[in-house]
Amino acid sequence: MQKTKFTLEQIEELRANPYTEYVSEKTIRFTQVFKNEFWYLYTHGKGPSKIFRELGYDPETLGQYRISNFAYKLTKKMEERTNLSPLERERDLQSQVDALRFEIDSLKKIIIRDDIEKRKR
């Protein structure tokens, strides 16, 4: 099944969601925070489409293929993590910490930029 392309309006809508890391007409990537939140809700019995809706995404915009594919890939990734050696697990956790630090730094820059814009007005 082929993924449908996002319209410019849909791209802007998806970009506005803080859980969106990147979006183009064919691709959307979600932040690590979104993946963690999704996994928590998914393992507590919520369905993928309902989770996407709760986290601010319109399932109709994303399409069932993307939603199902995301859930499948995340499940595989999480299963791989449970089979890691202690050293591999430590490296994986350090990678997650580094990614979160990068996200925090990016958010700080956005806040500073917004504060500067407000002062100019």
Image (tube, rainbow, N blue to C red):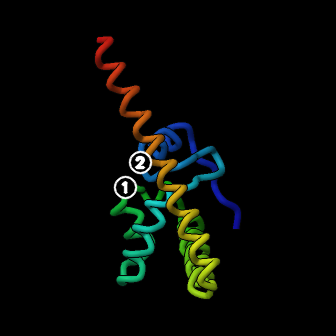
Foreground of the two, 77 or 41: 77
Looking at the image, tell me whether mark 1 or mark 2 is earlier in sequence order.
Answer: 2
Residue at image mark 1: 56
Q: Can you name the residue that lies furthest to the right here?
A: 2
User: How many numbered tags mark residues here?
Assistant: 2
Foreground of the two, 6 or 23: 23
Image: 57 above or below 40? above
Element on which disc 1 rests = loop
Foreground of the two, 41 or 101: 101
Q: How far from the left and from the top, in percent, is residue 20?
A: 49, 50
- Residue displayed at 40% across by 67% down: 37
Residue at image mark 2: 18
Q: How far from the left and from the top, in percent, is residue 49?
A: 43, 69
Foreground of the two, 78 or 19: 78
Separation of marks 1 and 2 at Cα, in angstroms: 9 Å
Q: How far from the left and from the top, in percent, is residue 38?
A: 43, 69
Q: Mark 1 and 2 residues: CB-CB less than 8 Å, in contact? A: yes
Q: Quadrant of the N terminus?
A: bottom right
Q: Amino acid at mark 2?
A: Pro
